[in-house]
Amino acid sequence: MTQDQTTDSGTTPQNPAPWRPSRTVAVVLAGGTGTRLGLGIPKQLLKIAGKPIIEHTLAVFEAAAEIDEIIVLMASGHVAEAQQIVDKAGFRKVTKVIEGGDTRNATTRVALDAVGEEDCNILFHDAVRPLLSGRIVRECVNALWTYAAVDVAIPSADTIIQVDEDECITDIPVRSTLRRGQTPQAFRSSTIREAYRRAEGDPNFAATDDCGVVLRYLPEVSIKVIDGSDENIKVTHPVDVHLADKLFQLAAAKVPRLTDRRAYSEEVSGRTIVVFGGSYGIGHDLAELARSYGAQVFPFSRSSTGTHVERPEDVEAALKAAFDATGRIDHVVVTAGILEKGALAEMDQETIDRVLQVNFVGPVTVARQSLPYLQHTKGQLLLYTSSSYTRGRADYALYSATKAALVNLTQALSDEWAELGVRVNIINPERTATPMRTKAFGSEPEHTLLAAETVAQASLDVLISDLTGQVIDVRRPPGEAPAAVVPAQAGQPTSAAPVG
């Protein structure tokens, strides 16, 4: 069990006795039936971003170093379905998938029985809050070293009003003192057990919130509040489904950097990397960087090798050449892309076909041809999008559309290829100094552009990571030197990276 025994400088809790939990258990409460969504299945089984909501939620706790065990409390009649999701995803921390109670309170009691009598940390979390962050989990667990009960909440951005039975305002509380509650709620097991023990003697007991039970029946216990996040939404109403799906689409993973050159060399040396679009811009810089760490890199492009990414025979020949030379292909990178500005109605058919073929058919072709090689090495396909994928923009509608398509392709292939051990990710750089951008937009202020070398470094970090299905934003770090002015390479619009 990994825990950081930090303490808070705020109010000292009433019970200063040392807390020595045996383990930390995440209890995922999945008893909802989806009534408000108008579904025929529990809402936690609804798919968002390609996976059941509960699978996204469980993945957060599975990945959290602070969590030792996960117990799932499932809606009546759907335990087998939840167990199938757990088994398929390979969640090793899940020890029990059991039926919850008829009420929220009854479900907590079932969970306490399932946890056992040992002193431990318990985190109760709504299964339909799939966008929980690892930061919140970590801070909840850390707070339990000092506090016996912990809640998660965010400030209210709206004014809260209190009304009577006639829907007339009776009070407007001071907003600065109000918070909107979220989950998880975390407790020392002895505290939440005692709160429920005392509640059993109250004939009027009813609660939908475990911290509320502690507040009412153990008023002497301080309940620490941890900052939640706006993204940690609860999927309750139909609009929440669309919001959550979009948040998953826009979520950007963070990739850790290795500590020094030797660490990179140990990771990269001996790997074979194929770069389509490797003559200029980001593709070229990535090839040079990987070579400097000992990788065997094979760059292909229309200008240098006559390789057209949209032609299956060209892609097949390129991959075969790399494989014949080294006996393996660990990573395939597609930075090739073109940007043709102009209103769609004014574009000729030849231009339209070229943009669609290079920007979308090309990556699809590379993906299909690369799979047998990457499956053998458990490797990775890396694609590139741009910030325009989130919303189409006038005068480069096809470019925006194809970049949005590549994000969806990445997420879909990561699911399809997961069982094969092949990872798929996509880089989303901000406006970058590349020949393609210079050709399209001319000279721009240096301080507004990201250096291609920065994107290349981030790309290498992704290639040696365990990420899959992720959109990785690359932004210019504070204090980074302005990007060098990059001259446009005449006739070479397909070898650079996306435009922001």
Image (cartoon, rainbow, N blue to C red):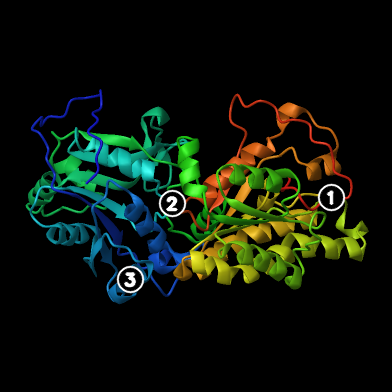
Q: Where is residue 342 shown, x and y percent of the image?
A: 88, 51
In the foreground, 364 or 133: 364
- Secondary element type, mark 3: helix
In the foreground, 303 or 358: 303
Going by the numbered disc 1, the residue's amino acid type is Gln
In the foreground, 271 or 231: 271
Using a 10 Å C-alpha cutoff, classify the residue at mark 1 as few (fewer than 14 neighbours), some (14 to 19) or many (20 or more): some
Is residue 405 positioned above or below 157 on the image? below
Q: Quadrant of residue 129?
A: bottom left
Q: Which dot, 3 or 2, sits closer to the camera?
A: 3
- Say whether marks 3 and 2 touch (CB < 8 Å): no
* Residue that label 2 marks: 131
Using a 10 Å C-alpha cutoff, classify the residue at mark 2 as few (fewer than 14 neighbours), some (14 to 19) or many (20 or more): many
Q: CA distance from mark 3 to mark 2?
A: 21 Å
How many tags in the picture? Answer: 3
Is residue 446 positioned above or below 236 on the image? above
* Residue found at x 33% / y 68%: 86
* Residue that label 3 marks: 87
Q: Which mark is residue 424?
A: none
* Residue that label 1 marks: 492
Which quadrant of the figure contains the C terminus?
Answer: top right
Q: Where is residue 267 shown, x and y percent of the image?
A: 47, 48
Q: Please state if 454 lies on the left or on the right of 221 as rendered.
A: right
Q: Please state if 217 lies on the left or on the right of 253 as rendered.
A: left
